[in-house]
Amino acid sequence: MTTVHTDARIWVCPEGTHELENAVREGGGRVVSVEAANAIVTVDDDIERLRRSLHPAIRWVQVGAAGVDWLLDAGVIDHERVWTAAKGVHARPMAEHTIGLMIAAARDFNRRFCAHSWGDRGGRLLAGNTVGIVGCGSVGEALLRLLAPFDVRTLALTRSGRTVAGADQSLGPDGLDRLLRESDFVVVAAPATPETASMISADQLASMKADAWLVNVSRGVLVDSEALVDALTEGRVGGAALDVTEPEPLPDDHPLWRFPNVMSTPHVASTPEMALPALRSRVRENVARFARGDELIGVVDLAAGY
């Protein structure tokens, strides 16, 4: 029998975040001070404030980010309470951004938008290309839906090798080399874990087509920046479109800024404003589930790291 918890006392951080406070109330919870709370909804990036707020009565923490590597690295996430991430909340904005980066790369916008003369004619269609998605979770699945009208071939790689709806081919980890060899656009959308750090390094870049573009919208640590600089310098890849980098922010004197075939955006594939409607819906649903004692959405798998 399901245990019923009727007293969902939620501290929203930062305080005064009205959209999320309203979502708590709509889900049947009460917005209270941290001292009186038994759960936390936070969109704050102040790790130490969150650490200080974790008193023994706190049973559940909802964070506004999809990736929790920064909290795991800081040792904040524990086994004492349930932690939920905003898995899927940022999927549509990130997928839209990825489409924009791929179209910009195909049409040579990176060079044309900086030009001061008419220039030559060029560019290519997105249609007819192969798009490989490394880490086809919620972002990858949203990207597949948006790619459907573009008449591209899609390869979707997941840790489990499960069949991914909408993909032409579903691959497991042993299919990474094939994905890299066959793709015209390699989209990195995997979570940041110890296993995925530098998963795109010199050997992987060497497997890519010489005119293929690398698109990273996940975390900068998944791509070896030095190896990418080397590959770009030697003309072994077509270019890179990066919403995330390592280090981040990318220093003004970093070599990646010098390449005309590199596009960089400052980690804005999904912003809090873009994701707020979906996050509000997630908070409302999870508060209602918490109050009922039901399983929450987006529970962090500590063993997997996301």
Image: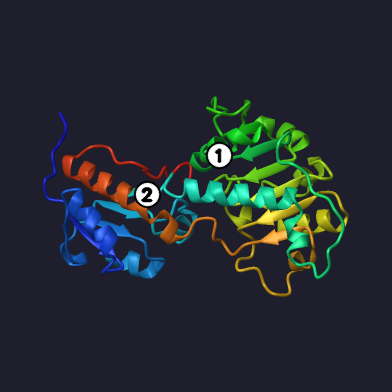
Give the quarter of the figure containing the N terminus.
top left
Q: Quadrant of residue 252?
A: bottom right
Mark 2 element type? helix
Numbered mark located on residue 278 in the image:
2
Q: Residue at x 32, y 47 (%)?
A: 282
Q: Residue at x 62, y 40 (%)?
A: 134
Q: Residue at x 84, y 44 (%)?
A: 210
Q: Are marks 1 and 2 in contact (CB under 8 Å)?
A: no
Q: Is residue 167 visible?
A: yes
Residue 300 relative to residue 61: left or right: right
- Residue type at mark 1 is Leu
Q: Is residue 82 visible?
A: no
In percent of width and height, residue 235 lies at: 87, 53
Pointer 2 local density, CA inside 10 Å: few below 14, some 14–19, many at least 20? some
Q: Nearer the viewer, mark 1 or mark 2?
A: 1
Q: Quadrant of residue 207?
A: top right
Q: Which residue is mark 1?
A: 146
Q: Residue furthest left?
A: 6
